[in-house]
Amino acid sequence: MINHTRKFRILAAGIVFIILFSFSCSQNNPNINEGYIGLCYYAESGTIEGRYYVFITPSDDDGMEDIDEMIISHKKEGLRWRLSASDWVLINTDGKTWIGTHSISMPDREALPRGVFTVELIDKAGMTGSMQLTFDVRGAAHPFPKFSIEDRRYSIQSEYPAHYFICYDRSGAFLRTVKIENAEGTLSSLSLPRDCESLALWAESPEIFLSALTERTGIR
């Protein structure tokens, strides 16, 4: 028969083992430090479609490679968008790493819901971290912008407060973004890349995270 002293030693040893095992297998929850949600209207094939863009700065003590999924949900409407590392865009800027997407849309071009969205990170151990983001701008705050190019001159018709030309080469690859200060002017007055063959207009209201992107127009 095991005496009480020996039973206590066995029990104590078992408790110490459980504690040590728990520490050795502990996991750290992923965190979301910052985030934003915005709406961009795109012109494609003669139609205009709205898509949300969502970006966050994640952190995980187990390393960025430990983050497995990013889920964006609108609980009131029962909607969910699931992204893996191969789906999200990764941007490094000002010493911060942002991950997210420009492509939150509805099937059949249905209207995007407004209100509160929940962004959730899930790591490989199933640990989670989340943040709520709100977008509540109703309708289109500005008409969709237009621009034209004729005789090496450009003209912009827009109620958005800020404008940029997106420059593309002959293959359609992105080259550079050029801020536009005037609604009209010559192309030669802009710092366009030499191999720029077409432009698209990016117009935005940064204070309400609302923007619009036109289709490309050739400049030759």
Image (cartoon, rainbow, N blue to C red):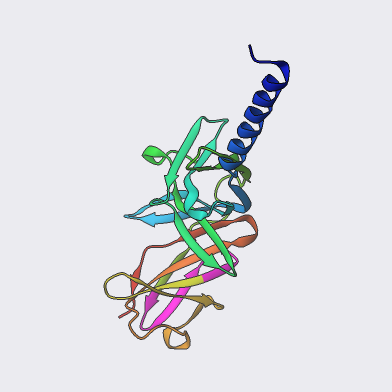
Query: Which quarter of the rendered picture does the N terminus lie within?
Result: top right
Q: Nearer the viewer, residue 141 or 191?
A: 191
Q: Is residue 114 visible?
A: no
Q: Residue furthest left?
A: 171
Instruction: Give the magenta-colored segment's residue range.
Output: 149-163
In this picture, residue 2 sits left or right of residue 70: right
Q: Nearer the viewer, residue 166 or 184?
A: 166
List x then y, in percent, for residue 44.
35, 55
Residue appearing at x 38%, y 52% in the figure:
86
Question: Quick check: is 100 in the magenta stretch?
Answer: no
Q: Is residue 13 above or below residue 163?
A: above
The quarter of the displayed image where residue 13 is located: top right
Residue appearing at x 59%, y 53% in the figure:
59
Q: Nearer the viewer, residue 192 or 219?
A: 192
List x then y, in percent, for residue 50.
46, 49
Residue appearing at x 43%, y 88% in the figure:
188
Q: Nearer the viewer, residue 112 or 188?
A: 112
Residue appearing at x 60%, y 45% in the figure:
28
Query: Which quarter of the rendered picture does the C terminus lie within?
Result: bottom left
Q: Is residue 43 above or below residue 16?
A: below
In this picture, residue 36 sits left or right of residue 147: right
The quarter of the displayed image where residue 89 is located: bottom left
Q: Is residue 201 visible?
A: yes
Number of numbered tags placed on the structure image: 0
Q: Main secondary structure of the magenta part?
A: strand
Question: Quick check: is 153 in the magenta stretch?
Answer: yes
List x then y, in percent, for residue 166.
43, 71
